[in-house]
Amino acid sequence: MHNDLECRSSNSEEVDLLEFLEGIWQQKLLIFLVTIAVAAVALAYALLAKPVYEAKVFLAAPSSSDIADLNYGRTSQTGLEPFTSGKVFDIFVEHLNGESLRRRFFKEVYLPSMPTGQGAQGALYTAFNGAFDVVQLTGEPPRAYVAFRGRDPAVAAQWAAAYIDKASAAAKAELLHDVTREAEVRAGALQLELDNLRENGQRQRDDKVTRLQEALRIATTIGLENPPLINGEVSKALPSKMDGELTYMRGSKALAAEIANLQQRKSEDPFISELRDIQTRQQFYQGLVSAKRDINVYKLDGTIEQPDVPVKPKRNLIIALGVIVGFGLGCLIAALRYALKNMQRRRA
């Protein structure tokens, strides 16, 4: 008995499904008309929508020759770490993605090109951000691309080139500033060392004059004008011992002449042993500060071409979606009509 009920229930469900499908099929003209109507709307949109073009520029890391001027003087001997092409390119990509550059390009290039009364700047900036992409690609050598989208293909290509130029100029300025500043700091540190050496040399000269003046007073007091003449072995060793407490044995004439010479000396530079080496190193870093550098922070991978095929709208995809959506909508309307008629028939 239970099996008979299940069989009747299954047969009833099959009959209901067949009736439902038959009811839908009877409205095939409605489904066809709805499909044609939606597809026609999709076709009209695909044909009437303004095309959007995308200018895409591929960029690669600079070669070693492109950054050779940047690495001038940066060796292990000078203590300056050389820049690699990858590091230089990363700095360039940071500027491509930088908010400051986007804002500046928006105000200087994008905003003046817009007709007046196009809306608030916030909305325009949002639209501008959606109009271009900066994508860094994986792999070696480092690569990236900049893509600008717009109604005018020529403008899109021009904006892509202009944006890259501005990012390149900003990256160059940062790199050259860092290189120059680093050399300035090292040159300044060496100048401080030179000043300390000169100041110390001056103090040593003043101390020597003081010691010689005391020796002169002693020599004058005992009436020793010239060094004593001693024959034999002692006379050879004595001059080397005429320092410290025995300095007065040089004689008052020699001491007075040496004091006068020291007091008239204009510079202690020739008498400071480390000074010339430090001056040479300082001049080297000063040369790095004033050196003119011509560098490139990227290499163009291909050419900047004006696009001739729009990326939007995608007509074939829009039409296909219109047909699918229209068919689905037609089937839905047919199913609702069938359900409504079935309810009315049961009530009657």
Image: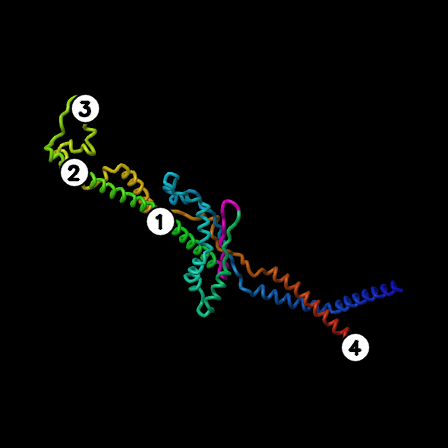
Mark 1 vs mark 3, foreground winner is: 3
Residue 214: mark: 2
Q: In this view, does 30 lie to the left or right of 179?
A: right
Which residue position is annotated with label 1? 181
Please, what is the three-letter code of the amino acid marked with disc 4? Arg
Q: The residue tagged with tag 4: helix, strand or loop?
A: helix
Please tell me whether residue 142 belongs to the stretch shown in magenta.
yes
Point out residue 202 in the picture as x, y percentages from the top left corner.
Answer: 22, 42
Q: Is residue 216 left or right of residue 178?
A: left
Which residue position is annotated with label 3? 234
Q: Residues within 10 Å of mark 2 (few under 14, many from 20)?
A: some
Q: In this view, does 334 lie to the left or right of 272?
A: right
Real-space Cα separation, disc 4 to disc 1, in angstroms = 91 Å
Please, what is the three-letter code of the amino acid marked with disc 3? Val
Question: Residue at the spot x=24%, y=44% of the render?
Answer: 199
Q: The residue tagged with tag 1: helix, strand or loop?
A: helix
Q: Which of marks 3 and 4 is nearer the N terminus?
A: 3
